[in-house]
Image (cartoon, helix red, strand yellow):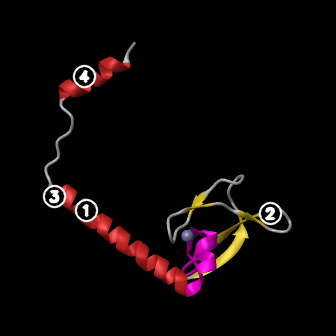
Amino acid sequence: MKIIWEHSIYAGNAPVFCSLCDRRSYPVRDRHNQLLLAVIYDGRGVAWGEACQDCVAAGAEGIRLRLQERIKTLQAKVEDLQKLTAEGIETPSLEQEFQIHRQGTP
Ligand SMILES: [Zn+2]
Protein backbone atom coordinates (compact mmCIF):
# COMPACT_ATOMS: atom_id res chain seq x y z
CA MET A 1 0.00 0.00 0.00
CA LYS A 2 1.19 3.45 -0.90
CA ILE A 3 -0.35 6.76 0.25
CA ILE A 4 0.24 9.92 -1.80
CA TRP A 5 -0.99 13.48 -1.22
CA GLU A 6 -2.80 14.58 -4.36
CA HIS A 7 -4.95 17.52 -5.42
CA SER A 8 -8.57 16.85 -4.49
CA ILE A 9 -10.70 15.79 -7.44
CA TYR A 10 -13.87 16.79 -5.58
CA ALA A 11 -15.53 20.20 -5.60
CA GLY A 12 -15.05 22.32 -2.47
CA ASN A 13 -14.16 21.25 1.02
CA ALA A 14 -16.57 18.28 1.09
CA PRO A 15 -15.65 15.54 3.56
CA VAL A 16 -14.67 12.05 2.43
CA PHE A 17 -14.65 8.82 4.43
CA CYS A 18 -11.26 7.35 5.26
CA SER A 19 -10.92 3.96 3.55
CA LEU A 20 -8.73 2.74 6.41
CA CYS A 21 -10.65 3.73 9.58
CA ASP A 22 -14.00 4.77 8.03
CA ARG A 23 -13.99 8.13 9.85
CA ARG A 24 -15.00 11.37 8.17
CA SER A 25 -12.04 13.30 6.80
CA TYR A 26 -11.60 16.75 5.26
CA PRO A 27 -9.07 17.76 2.60
CA VAL A 28 -6.11 19.86 3.75
CA ARG A 29 -4.81 23.05 2.13
CA ASP A 30 -1.21 23.30 1.00
CA ARG A 31 0.91 26.49 0.81
CA HIS A 32 -0.69 27.36 -2.53
CA ASN A 33 -4.18 27.07 -1.03
CA GLN A 34 -4.84 23.88 -3.04
CA LEU A 35 -6.99 21.21 -1.44
CA LEU A 36 -5.12 17.93 -0.98
CA LEU A 37 -6.30 14.43 -0.14
CA ALA A 38 -4.16 11.44 0.85
CA VAL A 39 -4.99 8.84 -1.81
CA ILE A 40 -4.36 5.15 -1.08
CA TYR A 41 -2.97 2.84 -3.81
CA ASP A 42 -2.44 -0.89 -3.61
CA GLY A 43 0.61 -2.71 -5.00
CA ARG A 44 -0.95 -2.84 -8.48
CA GLY A 45 -1.54 0.91 -8.52
CA VAL A 46 -5.30 0.64 -8.01
CA ALA A 47 -6.77 3.54 -5.99
CA TRP A 48 -8.58 2.51 -2.80
CA GLY A 49 -9.99 5.88 -1.82
CA GLU A 50 -8.64 8.40 0.68
CA ALA A 51 -6.92 8.22 4.06
CA CYS A 52 -7.60 10.69 6.90
CA GLN A 53 -4.81 12.80 8.44
CA ASP A 54 -4.85 10.69 11.62
CA CYS A 55 -4.17 7.51 9.66
CA VAL A 56 -1.41 9.15 7.61
CA ALA A 57 0.16 10.44 10.87
CA ALA A 58 -0.13 6.96 12.45
CA GLY A 59 2.56 5.65 10.07
CA ALA A 60 2.92 2.17 8.60
CA GLU A 61 2.69 0.26 11.93
CA GLY A 62 -0.18 2.43 13.18
CA ILE A 63 -2.09 1.95 9.93
CA ARG A 64 -1.65 -1.83 10.19
CA LEU A 65 -3.02 -1.80 13.77
CA ARG A 66 -5.95 0.43 12.74
CA LEU A 67 -6.77 -1.91 9.85
CA GLN A 68 -6.61 -4.97 12.13
CA GLU A 69 -9.01 -3.27 14.60
CA ARG A 70 -11.39 -2.35 11.77
CA ILE A 71 -11.28 -5.92 10.35
CA LYS A 72 -12.24 -7.26 13.82
CA THR A 73 -15.17 -4.82 14.04
CA LEU A 74 -16.35 -5.68 10.52
CA GLN A 75 -16.08 -9.44 11.18
CA ALA A 76 -18.21 -9.05 14.35
CA LYS A 77 -20.75 -7.06 12.31
CA VAL A 78 -20.83 -9.76 9.61
CA GLU A 79 -21.48 -12.42 12.27
CA ASP A 80 -24.36 -10.33 13.69
CA LEU A 81 -25.87 -9.90 10.21
CA GLN A 82 -25.53 -13.63 9.52
CA LYS A 83 -27.46 -14.39 12.75
CA LEU A 84 -30.11 -11.86 11.74
CA THR A 85 -30.52 -13.21 8.21
CA ALA A 86 -30.88 -16.78 9.58
CA GLU A 87 -34.01 -15.66 11.51
CA GLY A 88 -37.51 -15.40 10.07
CA ILE A 89 -38.37 -11.99 8.63
CA GLU A 90 -41.70 -10.30 9.39
CA THR A 91 -42.44 -6.97 7.76
CA PRO A 92 -45.13 -4.58 9.14
CA SER A 93 -48.71 -5.80 8.62
CA LEU A 94 -50.86 -4.36 5.80
CA GLU A 95 -53.02 -2.73 8.46
CA GLN A 96 -49.97 -0.93 9.89
CA GLU A 97 -48.83 0.17 6.43
CA PHE A 98 -52.33 1.47 5.69
CA GLN A 99 -52.35 3.52 8.93
CA ILE A 100 -48.99 5.09 8.08
CA HIS A 101 -50.18 6.17 4.63
CA ARG A 102 -53.48 7.52 5.98
CA GLN A 103 -51.62 9.64 8.55
CA GLY A 104 -49.36 10.97 5.80
CA THR A 105 -52.25 12.58 3.86
CA PRO A 106 -53.81 15.86 5.12
ZN1 LIG B 1 -8.41 7.14 8.90
Ligand 1 shows up in which quadrant of the image? bottom right
In the image, residue 91 above or below residue 64: above
Q: Earlier in the sequence, mark 4 or mark 3?
A: 3
Contact, mark 4 vs mark 3 (Cβ under 8 Å): no
Residue 49 lies in magenta, yes or no? yes
Residue 45 lies in magenta, yes or no? yes
Given the current orientation, which residue lies at the most extreme bottom position?
61
Distance from Cα at disc 3 to Cα at disc 2: 50 Å
How many marks overall?
A: 4
Q: Earlier in the sequence, mark 2 or mark 4?
A: 2
| Disc 1 residue type (three-letter) | Asp
| Disc 3 residue type (three-letter) | Ala
Q: Which mark is residue 26?
A: none
The quadrant of the rendering that contains the C terminus is top left
Judging from the image, what secondary structure is the residue with disc 3 in?
A: helix
**Residue 6 position in % (x across, y down):** 71, 70
Q: Earlier in the sequence, mark 2 or mark 1?
A: 2
Q: Earlier in the sequence, mark 3 or mark 2?
A: 2
- Discs 1/3, front: 1
Q: Is residue 43 visible?
A: no
Judging from the image, what secondary structure is the residue with disc 4 in?
A: helix
27 left or right of 89 in image: right
Q: Nearer the viewer, residue 41 or 17?
A: 17
Q: Which mark is residue 86?
A: 3
Residue marked by disc 2: 34
Q: Name the quadrant containing residue 74.
A: bottom left
Q: Which residues are magenta?
A: 39-60
Q: Which mark is residue 98?
A: 4
